[in-house]
Image (cartoon, coloured by chain):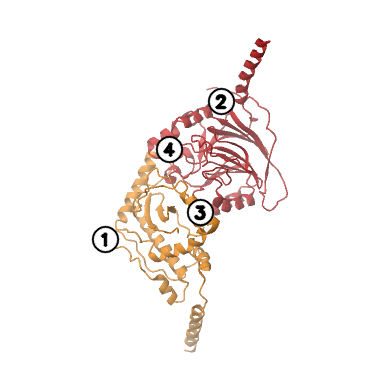
Chain colours: A orange, B red
Amino acid sequence: MKLIRILIVAVLTVSCNRATTPERTDHQSDEAAPRAASSETRQPAVTPQPTTLPSQGEKPVPARTPIADQAKATGVNPDAAVLADFTSRINAYMKLRKEAIKDAPPLKETKDPAKIKAAQDGMSREIRAARANAAHGDIFTPEITAQFRRMLSPELKGDDGRDAKAIIKDDAPTNITFKVNAKYPEGAPVPTVPASLLVNLPTLPEPLQFRIIEKHLVLVDEDADVIVDYALNIIK
Amino acid sequence: MHRLLYIAILVSTLVLPVSAQELRLPNKPGSVKFAVIGDTGTGDQNQRAIANELASWRTRYPFDFVVMMGDNIYGGEKPSDFDKKFAGPYKPLLDAGVKFYAALGNHDDAAVQRNYKPFNMNGERFYSFKPQNNVRFFALDSNYVDKAQLDWLNKELTASGSGWKIMFFHHPLYSSGETHGSAEQQRGLLEPVFLKHGVNVVLSGHEHFYERIKPQKGIAYFIIGSSAKLRKGDLQKSDLTAFGDDREYAFMLMEIAGDELFFQTINQSGKTIDVGSVKRVSTEPAPGRSTQPVVPQAKPSPAQPGPRQSK
């Protein structure tokens, strides 16, 4: 009994200490948050909300999950919690993807580009079918979008920011359809992602990549040539 | 007297083009011989002109492989485009067993091209290969310099020993181009890694001209993005420029023999527009300089006619 009492006191002490930790400034959280999300060994700061990406017959995940509010209530860094939610959604996509393409011909090296295209189209078809009900905001929820804007904002100021914006404009494709499950238009240039922005975004598993088109951040499955989701007006 | 003068002028005009078309590389037995092309995938007459020159020069200088600086296939990437914009123009070289190693440009479909066997990318966005002991090439994806790529590069360079380390990728870290200019963002991430591990030479494209940059922090930089596209008047020669040409389509021949790398840049008419060499030197490590710096040499060995290959 005495032992239980000691344990309760210890737990309360720890949670009180967390609750009284000074709030991070925006700048601090911008720097720290991506590392937390990109580390392979670090556990998420909070248990991620159960997220299931919409597949056939399912409704899209509600976009307004108040992850940050829940994190605050439990004394956890809200930025890290939102990024953990992003990671969780990415992992869910990768799981769905793996299942969807398990019987599709793999993308493998060959001298025949027709075979590569056929493999890519097959993967694309299976993934789109498995995500038939996927919707904008499944991955880039409003909270995650806001968090990404905050993370990139410092990198878009000053000379470096002007440089980053110039890179985005350089050879930028036009007339891209922002549509979940759409294909990236054939023959359109692939805009270079400014390195200063990329290092501030979470690391993605292959074959996912970020692309910045005009002011928007697009999440692309490069092998399958599928737009997974997009976040509008990330670049201010 | 007038007749003699006329003959003298006639002889000199005949000699000049021959001289301009001479092989100016040592063409030593056992050296690493390769060609460099960039921004090639148009499928038009300009690409074919350079491709024809490459095939022609190979009869005198038997290079084993070609490195491609990206934008390997412009526009559509249907199977027929791979024939029109790559396999067709370079057929004589491919038939002769010349290997091509591609880097990805901003106009390339990465998923398709890295799996296209003739590009020898092994299914990867970034990779390395070793044509010979003491020389290693690293193809990077400068469109997307993420943590995974930087980690890989650090690891590969650490394991690569003290031989020649040659990088090739699309975006030039130093450039005097008006349209694009130096890729400073990529430079901020890549250059410290290059300096730390003693990279010697960096080859790039993206700019549709030829520019030889003065060695930067002990590293030699070349831009060769004019092997099918040309942006005339875009080269704003600057303090960075050792030599540049934005008036002619071009490709490069290179040769590594011992501690010296020789280069010869040739235009669509087969005329040599630049020639030289860089030498690796052993120096004490210094901050802000590659651990294996290069120094420009005087003009390389005099023209040596290489052995002609029988067809």
Which of the numbered marks, if any, corresponds to residue A111?
4
In the structure shown, which secondary structural element does the residue marked by tag 4 occupy? Answer: loop
Mark 2 and mark 3: Cα distance apart in space: 45 Å
Which-is-in-front pick, marks 1 and 4?
A: 1
Which-is-in-front pick, marks 1 and 3?
A: 3
Q: Chain of mark 4?
A: A
Question: Which mark sits nearer the N-terminus, 3 or 4?
Answer: 4
Which of the numbered marks, if any, corresponds to residue B25?
none
Mark 2 and mark 1: Cα distance apart in space: 64 Å
Q: Which amino acid, by three-letter code, is at mark 4? A: Lys
Residue at image position (37%, 69%) is A65
Mark 1 and mark 4: Cα distance apart in space: 40 Å
Q: Chain of mark 2?
A: B
Q: Which is nearer the eye, B175 or B201?
A: B175
Q: Which residue bears the numbered disc 1?
A: A57
Q: Which residue bears the numbered disc 3?
A: A164
Mark 4 and mark 2: Cα distance apart in space: 26 Å
Q: Chain of mark 3?
A: A
Residue farthest along the front direction in this orientation:
B2
Q: Percent from the top left, x then y, of residue B36?
A: 55, 36
Residue B34 lies, with reference to residue A221, above or below; the image says: above
